[in-house]
Amino acid sequence: CKISVNSDFESGHRMGCLAINLMNRLEAKEFIPRVYTSVYAWINIWKEPFQAGLGKCLEGYDAGALSGDTECAVYCLFQYASCALYNCGENLGTLEISVRLYTRRAIQYHQILPAKFLVTLHDLILRLVDSKESSYSLFFDSQEEALYQEGLESDISMCRYILLKRKFHAFFNGDMDAAAQFLEMSSGYPTGPNGRSSHLTLGVVLDGLIAFYFARKHQENEIRWRNIGEDVIDLARQWATSSNWNFANKLYLLEAEYFFLENDETRALAKYEQSIKAARDHRFIHEEGLASERAARFHLHYGRNKEALACLSQTKKCYKSWGAHGLVNYI
Protein backbone atom coordinates (compact mmCIF):
# COMPACT_ATOMS: atom_id res chain seq x y z
CA CYS A 1 0.00 0.00 0.00
CA LYS A 2 2.79 2.43 0.93
CA ILE A 3 4.43 1.96 -2.48
CA SER A 4 1.19 2.85 -4.31
CA VAL A 5 0.56 5.87 -2.09
CA ASN A 6 4.04 7.10 -3.11
CA SER A 7 2.97 6.78 -6.78
CA ASP A 8 5.13 3.76 -7.63
CA PHE A 9 2.12 2.02 -9.12
CA GLU A 10 4.08 -0.66 -10.96
CA SER A 11 5.87 -1.85 -7.82
CA GLY A 12 2.69 -1.61 -5.77
CA HIS A 13 0.80 -3.75 -8.27
CA ARG A 14 3.63 -6.27 -8.41
CA MET A 15 3.76 -6.57 -4.61
CA GLY A 16 -0.02 -6.88 -4.44
CA CYS A 17 0.01 -9.77 -6.92
CA LEU A 18 2.84 -11.38 -4.94
CA ALA A 19 0.84 -11.12 -1.70
CA ILE A 20 -2.13 -12.87 -3.30
CA ASN A 21 0.06 -15.58 -4.83
CA LEU A 22 1.78 -16.27 -1.50
CA MET A 23 -1.55 -16.39 0.31
CA ASN A 24 -2.91 -18.87 -2.22
CA ARG A 25 0.20 -21.07 -2.14
CA LEU A 26 0.07 -21.23 1.65
CA GLU A 27 -3.70 -21.78 1.54
CA ALA A 28 -4.01 -19.05 4.14
CA LYS A 29 -7.70 -18.39 3.52
CA GLU A 30 -8.07 -16.54 6.81
CA PHE A 31 -6.07 -13.67 5.29
CA ILE A 32 -8.32 -13.26 2.24
CA PRO A 33 -10.47 -10.40 3.60
CA ARG A 34 -7.47 -8.43 4.87
CA VAL A 35 -5.42 -8.92 1.70
CA TYR A 36 -8.33 -8.34 -0.68
CA THR A 37 -9.48 -5.11 0.94
CA SER A 38 -5.92 -3.75 0.61
CA VAL A 39 -5.05 -5.04 -2.86
CA TYR A 40 -8.34 -4.50 -4.67
CA ALA A 41 -9.39 -1.23 -3.01
CA TRP A 42 -6.04 0.57 -2.67
CA ILE A 43 -3.48 -0.96 -5.05
CA ASN A 44 -4.94 -2.55 -8.17
CA ILE A 45 -7.09 0.48 -8.97
CA TRP A 46 -3.95 2.13 -10.37
CA LYS A 47 -3.43 -0.66 -12.91
CA GLU A 48 -6.67 -2.59 -13.44
CA PRO A 49 -10.27 -1.51 -14.23
CA PHE A 50 -12.30 -0.41 -11.25
CA GLN A 51 -14.92 -3.01 -12.17
CA ALA A 52 -12.38 -5.84 -11.85
CA GLY A 53 -12.12 -5.48 -8.09
CA LEU A 54 -15.83 -5.47 -7.23
CA GLY A 55 -16.29 -9.24 -7.21
CA LYS A 56 -13.08 -9.71 -5.23
CA CYS A 57 -14.34 -7.40 -2.48
CA LEU A 58 -17.46 -9.55 -2.18
CA GLU A 59 -15.28 -12.67 -2.07
CA GLY A 60 -13.34 -11.00 0.74
CA TYR A 61 -16.56 -10.48 2.67
CA ASP A 62 -17.59 -14.13 2.25
CA ALA A 63 -14.18 -15.34 3.44
CA GLY A 64 -14.21 -13.03 6.44
CA ALA A 65 -17.72 -14.07 7.44
CA LEU A 66 -16.63 -17.72 7.34
CA SER A 67 -13.37 -17.21 9.24
CA GLY A 68 -14.78 -14.83 11.83
CA ASP A 69 -12.80 -11.76 10.66
CA THR A 70 -15.91 -9.62 10.72
CA GLU A 71 -13.99 -6.32 10.79
CA CYS A 72 -12.24 -6.87 7.45
CA ALA A 73 -15.32 -8.61 6.06
CA VAL A 74 -17.41 -5.49 6.62
CA TYR A 75 -14.68 -3.23 5.23
CA CYS A 76 -14.74 -5.38 2.08
CA LEU A 77 -18.46 -4.63 1.78
CA PHE A 78 -17.79 -0.93 2.26
CA GLN A 79 -15.02 -0.87 -0.36
CA TYR A 80 -17.28 -2.72 -2.79
CA ALA A 81 -20.19 -0.34 -2.28
CA SER A 82 -18.06 2.80 -2.37
CA CYS A 83 -16.30 1.82 -5.60
CA ALA A 84 -19.58 0.63 -7.15
CA LEU A 85 -21.17 4.03 -6.56
CA TYR A 86 -18.40 6.58 -6.97
CA ASN A 87 -16.17 4.87 -9.52
CA CYS A 88 -18.23 2.36 -11.49
CA GLY A 89 -21.65 3.97 -11.65
CA GLU A 90 -23.49 0.75 -10.83
CA ASN A 91 -27.29 0.89 -10.99
CA LEU A 92 -28.47 2.87 -7.98
CA GLY A 93 -31.72 0.97 -7.46
CA THR A 94 -29.89 -2.32 -7.11
CA LEU A 95 -27.09 -0.74 -5.10
CA GLU A 96 -29.52 0.88 -2.64
CA ILE A 97 -30.95 -2.53 -1.73
CA SER A 98 -27.47 -4.02 -1.33
CA VAL A 99 -26.03 -1.20 0.79
CA ARG A 100 -29.10 -1.24 3.03
CA LEU A 101 -28.40 -4.93 3.68
CA TYR A 102 -24.66 -4.35 4.15
CA THR A 103 -25.33 -1.66 6.75
CA ARG A 104 -27.57 -4.00 8.73
CA ARG A 105 -24.88 -6.69 8.63
CA ALA A 106 -22.23 -4.26 9.84
CA ILE A 107 -24.40 -3.30 12.81
CA GLN A 108 -25.18 -6.94 13.56
CA TYR A 109 -21.43 -7.64 13.61
CA HIS A 110 -20.98 -4.63 15.96
CA GLN A 111 -18.68 -2.99 13.40
CA ILE A 112 -19.98 0.49 14.10
CA LEU A 113 -17.37 2.65 12.34
CA PRO A 114 -17.68 0.92 8.93
CA ALA A 115 -21.45 0.89 9.51
CA LYS A 116 -21.31 4.69 9.73
CA PHE A 117 -19.37 4.85 6.48
CA LEU A 118 -22.00 2.63 4.87
CA VAL A 119 -24.82 4.80 6.25
CA THR A 120 -23.19 7.88 4.70
CA LEU A 121 -22.94 6.09 1.37
CA HIS A 122 -26.50 4.80 1.62
CA ASP A 123 -27.82 8.27 2.40
CA LEU A 124 -26.16 9.63 -0.75
CA ILE A 125 -27.77 6.88 -2.81
CA LEU A 126 -31.15 7.79 -1.32
CA ARG A 127 -30.61 11.42 -2.33
CA LEU A 128 -29.64 10.42 -5.86
CA VAL A 129 -32.69 8.18 -6.36
CA ASP A 130 -34.89 10.99 -4.98
CA SER A 131 -35.98 9.15 -1.86
CA LYS A 132 -37.26 11.05 1.18
CA GLU A 133 -35.79 8.52 3.62
CA SER A 134 -32.80 9.38 5.82
CA SER A 135 -30.30 6.58 6.29
CA TYR A 136 -28.93 8.27 9.41
CA SER A 137 -32.37 8.24 11.04
CA LEU A 138 -33.12 4.75 9.80
CA PHE A 139 -30.03 3.05 11.26
CA PHE A 140 -28.72 5.33 14.03
CA ASP A 141 -31.66 7.58 14.90
CA SER A 142 -29.26 10.44 14.25
CA GLN A 143 -28.35 13.11 11.70
CA GLU A 144 -25.36 13.57 9.41
CA GLU A 145 -24.03 16.58 11.29
CA ALA A 146 -23.92 14.57 14.53
CA LEU A 147 -21.74 11.94 12.84
CA TYR A 148 -19.54 14.69 11.41
CA GLN A 149 -19.01 16.28 14.84
CA GLU A 150 -18.29 12.85 16.30
CA GLY A 151 -15.67 12.32 13.61
CA LEU A 152 -13.96 15.57 14.56
CA GLU A 153 -13.38 14.12 18.00
CA SER A 154 -12.54 10.51 17.15
CA ASP A 155 -11.78 9.75 13.48
CA ILE A 156 -11.26 12.41 10.80
CA SER A 157 -11.67 9.79 8.07
CA MET A 158 -15.38 9.96 8.91
CA CYS A 159 -15.33 13.73 8.34
CA ARG A 160 -13.46 13.26 5.07
CA TYR A 161 -16.01 10.75 3.80
CA ILE A 162 -19.00 12.91 4.75
CA LEU A 163 -17.43 15.91 3.00
CA LEU A 164 -16.88 13.81 -0.13
CA LYS A 165 -20.54 12.84 -0.06
CA ARG A 166 -21.61 16.47 0.37
CA LYS A 167 -19.28 17.71 -2.36
CA PHE A 168 -20.43 14.99 -4.78
CA HIS A 169 -24.11 15.73 -4.18
CA ALA A 170 -23.67 19.50 -4.43
CA PHE A 171 -21.60 19.30 -7.61
CA PHE A 172 -23.88 16.91 -9.46
CA ASN A 173 -26.86 19.09 -8.51
CA GLY A 174 -25.20 22.26 -9.76
CA ASP A 175 -24.71 23.93 -6.36
CA MET A 176 -21.19 25.08 -7.08
CA ASP A 177 -20.90 27.45 -4.12
CA ALA A 178 -21.64 24.59 -1.73
CA ALA A 179 -19.29 22.29 -3.64
CA ALA A 180 -16.50 24.86 -3.27
CA GLN A 181 -17.24 25.18 0.44
CA PHE A 182 -16.89 21.42 0.92
CA LEU A 183 -13.68 21.46 -1.13
CA GLU A 184 -12.25 24.06 1.23
CA MET A 185 -13.36 22.12 4.31
CA SER A 186 -11.92 18.84 3.04
CA SER A 187 -8.54 20.47 2.43
CA GLY A 188 -8.14 20.35 6.20
CA TYR A 189 -8.06 16.55 6.03
CA PRO A 190 -5.24 15.73 3.59
CA THR A 191 -5.06 12.22 2.12
CA GLY A 192 -1.64 12.30 0.45
CA PRO A 193 -0.89 12.75 -3.26
CA ASN A 194 -3.11 9.95 -4.51
CA GLY A 195 -5.84 9.58 -1.94
CA ARG A 196 -5.26 5.82 -1.93
CA SER A 197 -8.87 4.60 -1.85
CA SER A 198 -10.74 4.53 -5.14
CA HIS A 199 -13.55 6.88 -4.13
CA LEU A 200 -11.12 9.63 -3.14
CA THR A 201 -9.71 9.77 -6.68
CA LEU A 202 -13.11 11.00 -7.87
CA GLY A 203 -13.06 13.59 -5.10
CA VAL A 204 -9.78 14.93 -6.46
CA VAL A 205 -11.23 15.13 -10.00
CA LEU A 206 -14.24 17.04 -8.68
CA ASP A 207 -11.84 19.49 -7.02
CA GLY A 208 -10.31 20.19 -10.42
CA LEU A 209 -13.69 20.71 -12.08
CA ILE A 210 -14.83 23.01 -9.28
CA ALA A 211 -11.60 24.98 -9.56
CA PHE A 212 -11.92 25.58 -13.30
CA TYR A 213 -15.55 26.64 -12.87
CA PHE A 214 -14.57 29.36 -10.42
CA ALA A 215 -11.46 30.34 -12.40
CA ARG A 216 -13.79 31.13 -15.35
CA LYS A 217 -15.50 33.78 -13.22
CA HIS A 218 -12.25 35.81 -13.51
CA GLN A 219 -12.45 37.20 -9.99
CA GLU A 220 -9.59 38.16 -7.68
CA ASN A 221 -8.94 34.51 -6.72
CA GLU A 222 -8.72 33.29 -10.33
CA ILE A 223 -5.00 32.40 -10.11
CA ARG A 224 -5.55 30.28 -7.01
CA TRP A 225 -8.40 28.35 -8.62
CA ARG A 226 -6.42 27.93 -11.85
CA ASN A 227 -3.47 26.52 -9.92
CA ILE A 228 -5.70 24.00 -8.14
CA GLY A 229 -7.17 22.88 -11.47
CA GLU A 230 -3.80 22.57 -13.17
CA ASP A 231 -2.40 20.56 -10.25
CA VAL A 232 -5.30 18.13 -10.56
CA ILE A 233 -4.64 17.78 -14.30
CA ASP A 234 -1.04 16.88 -13.54
CA LEU A 235 -2.22 14.16 -11.13
CA ALA A 236 -4.86 12.87 -13.54
CA ARG A 237 -2.28 12.66 -16.32
CA GLN A 238 -0.05 10.55 -14.07
CA TRP A 239 -3.01 8.32 -13.14
CA ALA A 240 -4.12 7.91 -16.76
CA THR A 241 -0.61 6.86 -17.75
CA SER A 242 -0.86 4.06 -15.20
CA SER A 243 -4.50 3.12 -15.90
CA ASN A 244 -5.98 4.52 -19.08
CA TRP A 245 -9.20 2.58 -18.46
CA ASN A 246 -9.93 4.20 -15.10
CA PHE A 247 -8.69 7.73 -15.64
CA ALA A 248 -8.57 8.72 -19.33
CA ASN A 249 -12.12 10.06 -19.41
CA LYS A 250 -11.47 12.11 -16.27
CA LEU A 251 -8.29 13.59 -17.71
CA TYR A 252 -10.07 14.52 -20.95
CA LEU A 253 -12.84 16.25 -19.01
CA LEU A 254 -10.39 18.23 -16.91
CA GLU A 255 -8.49 19.24 -20.05
CA ALA A 256 -11.77 20.27 -21.69
CA GLU A 257 -12.55 22.55 -18.74
CA TYR A 258 -9.02 23.97 -18.92
CA PHE A 259 -9.38 24.81 -22.62
CA PHE A 260 -12.83 26.26 -21.87
CA LEU A 261 -11.11 28.58 -19.40
CA GLU A 262 -8.58 29.49 -22.09
CA ASN A 263 -11.38 30.23 -24.62
CA ASP A 264 -9.94 27.58 -26.94
CA GLU A 265 -13.26 26.33 -28.33
CA THR A 266 -11.84 23.82 -30.78
CA ARG A 267 -9.66 21.92 -28.35
CA ALA A 268 -12.23 22.14 -25.56
CA LEU A 269 -14.94 20.58 -27.74
CA ALA A 270 -12.58 17.81 -28.86
CA LYS A 271 -11.75 16.98 -25.23
CA TYR A 272 -15.41 16.94 -24.18
CA GLU A 273 -16.14 14.50 -26.98
CA GLN A 274 -13.16 12.33 -26.01
CA SER A 275 -14.29 12.29 -22.37
CA ILE A 276 -17.84 11.26 -23.28
CA LYS A 277 -16.61 8.51 -25.59
CA ALA A 278 -14.06 7.14 -23.10
CA ALA A 279 -16.62 7.08 -20.28
CA ARG A 280 -19.09 5.25 -22.53
CA ASP A 281 -16.48 2.76 -23.77
CA HIS A 282 -15.30 2.03 -20.22
CA ARG A 283 -18.87 1.71 -18.85
CA PHE A 284 -18.81 4.70 -16.49
CA ILE A 285 -22.41 5.75 -17.17
CA HIS A 286 -22.46 8.40 -14.43
CA GLU A 287 -19.32 10.04 -15.76
CA GLU A 288 -20.63 9.94 -19.32
CA GLY A 289 -23.62 11.89 -18.01
CA LEU A 290 -21.35 14.31 -16.16
CA ALA A 291 -19.18 14.97 -19.23
CA SER A 292 -22.29 15.53 -21.36
CA GLU A 293 -23.65 17.99 -18.80
CA ARG A 294 -20.37 19.95 -18.69
CA ALA A 295 -20.32 20.00 -22.50
CA ALA A 296 -23.87 21.43 -22.44
CA ARG A 297 -22.70 24.28 -20.22
CA PHE A 298 -19.82 24.88 -22.62
CA HIS A 299 -22.20 25.13 -25.61
CA LEU A 300 -24.59 27.40 -23.69
CA HIS A 301 -21.73 29.77 -22.94
CA TYR A 302 -21.19 30.26 -26.66
CA GLY A 303 -24.90 30.49 -27.47
CA ARG A 304 -25.18 27.08 -29.16
CA ASN A 305 -28.56 26.16 -27.67
CA LYS A 306 -29.30 23.30 -30.06
CA GLU A 307 -26.02 21.54 -29.24
CA ALA A 308 -26.53 22.20 -25.53
CA LEU A 309 -30.00 20.66 -25.62
CA ALA A 310 -28.60 17.55 -27.33
CA CYS A 311 -25.98 17.19 -24.61
CA LEU A 312 -28.55 17.65 -21.84
CA SER A 313 -30.78 15.02 -23.44
CA GLN A 314 -27.84 12.60 -23.36
CA THR A 315 -27.16 13.55 -19.74
CA LYS A 316 -30.75 12.71 -18.78
CA LYS A 317 -30.50 9.40 -20.62
CA CYS A 318 -27.31 8.49 -18.73
CA TYR A 319 -28.66 9.50 -15.33
CA LYS A 320 -31.92 7.65 -15.95
CA SER A 321 -29.97 4.51 -16.84
CA TRP A 322 -27.88 5.00 -13.70
CA GLY A 323 -31.07 5.23 -11.64
CA ALA A 324 -30.37 8.79 -10.43
CA HIS A 325 -33.96 10.05 -10.66
CA GLY A 326 -33.12 13.06 -8.49
CA LEU A 327 -30.52 14.18 -11.02
CA VAL A 328 -32.90 13.54 -13.92
CA ASN A 329 -35.39 15.90 -12.27
CA TYR A 330 -32.65 18.49 -11.75
CA ILE A 331 -31.54 18.35 -15.38
Image (cartoon, helix red, strand yellow):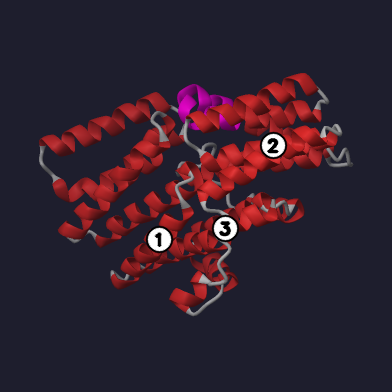
Which residue sits at x=79%, y=34%?
Answer: 306
- Check disc 3 and report its element: helix, strand or loop: helix
- Check disc 2 and report its element: helix, strand or loop: helix
Q: In this rendering, is residue 277 above or below 180?
A: above
The residue indicated by pointer 3 is 128
Figure quadrant of the N terminus: top left
The answer to whether residue 223 is seen in the rendering is: no
Report x, y in % for residue 314.
Answer: 63, 39
Label annotation for residue 99 = 1
Distance between the alpha carbons at the discs numbered 3 and 2 = 20 Å
Distance between the alpha carbons at the discs numbered 2 and 1 = 31 Å
Hey, which quadrant is residue 249 in on the image?
top right
Residue 272 vs residue 225, the one in the foreground = 272
Identity of the amino acid at label 3? Leu
Magenta extent: 234-250
Q: In this rendering, is residue 92 above or below 11?
A: below
